[in-house]
Amino acid sequence: MKTRRVFLKLSGEALAGSGHTGFDEATVREVARQVKLSVDAGVQVGIVIGGGNFWRGRTSEAIDRTKADQIGMLATVMNCIYVSEIFRSAGMKTAILTPFACGSMTELFSKDKANAYFEEGRAVFFAGGTGHPYFSTDTGIALRAIEMDADCILLAKSIDGVYDSDPKVNPQAKKYDTISIQEVIDKQLAVVDLTASIMCMEHKMPMAVFSLNEKDGIANAMQGRVNGTLVTV
C-alpha cells in the first residue's frame, strides 16, 4: 500500500494570530501538535507557508516588482525556519529546502533529497516559493506537490471551505462540499491563484479546503476526513 503523502499550505497571516504580524506561538504549537499525530502515524507531510505576516507584495512604486517578490520569498524562508523549530521542539525531525542557496540555514531543493527526508519520517518544509518572481506560494505548493507525487494539497485557511461568493460580504453565500477544479476556474472562485489552479487541473492534483481554526482540522484532513470543501479533478 502506498504511503500517504500530503502537502499542507499555511498562510503567514493565520500563523500571526490576532496580532496580524510576526508569529503567535500558541497557534504554531497547535499546528505542530496536529501534524505530529499524522507524522507519527506514517503520513509523509510537506509544508509550504505564505509570507503575508511579514510582506504582502509591492507596497510602493519605488520598489521593483521583482525585488518585492524576492522579499516575499525571504519572508517564507523566515516563516519556515521558525515553524520548523517549533515542530522540532514538539518532537519531530524536519528539513527545510529552498530553490536558492541560503547559506547553512536551508538546503537546496532536489526531488531525491526531499524523497529521502520523507522516507526518514521528517516533516519537509518547501520554502522560498518557486525561486522566481511573479509566482505565488499557491503556485509554489502546486509545483512541489505535483513534482513530489503528493496525494493531495491541504489548504488550511481562515475560512472553512469554498463558497460561491464571499461569506463575509454575503450572508447567503453557499458553501460547496465538493467542487471540480474546472468549476473553480470557470467561476473564478480563487481557491488558489489561476496559475496554481490550472497546474492542478492539468496534473490532476486534488485539494481540500478547511478552517485552520477548526479543532483537529489539520489532523483530520491528513487522515482524509475533511470538514470543508473537496476540490476534485
Image (cartoon, helix red, strand yellow):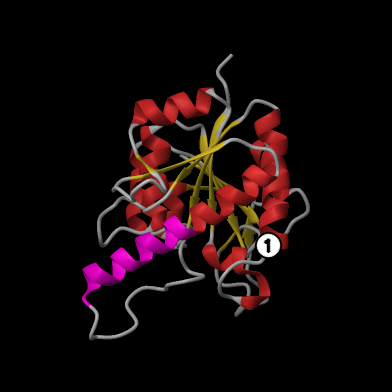
Residue segment shown in magenta: 64-78
Tell me residue 132's x, y (percent): 25, 55
Q: Looking at the image, which residue sits at the far right?
A: 215
In the structure shown, which secondary structural element does the residue marked by tag 1 occupy? helix
Quadrant that contains the N terminus:
top right
What residue is at 42 percent from the left and 64 percent from the top?
Answer: 75
Which kind of residue does numbered mark 1 sit on? Glu
Q: Main secondary structure of the magenta part?
A: helix
Q: Which residue is mark 1?
A: 25
What residue is at 34 percent from the left and 38 percent from the top?
Answer: 109
Write down the quadrant of residue 184 in the picture: bottom left
Q: Left or right: where does residue 15 sit relative to residue 58?
A: right
Above or below for 225 versus 105: above
Above or below for 18 versus 137: below
73 inside magenta stretch = yes
What residue is at 29 percent from the left and 72 percent from the top?
Answer: 68
Tell me residue 120's x, y (percent): 54, 24
Above or below for 18 versus 225: below
Tell me residue 170's x, y (percent): 62, 77
Visible in this render: residue 178? no
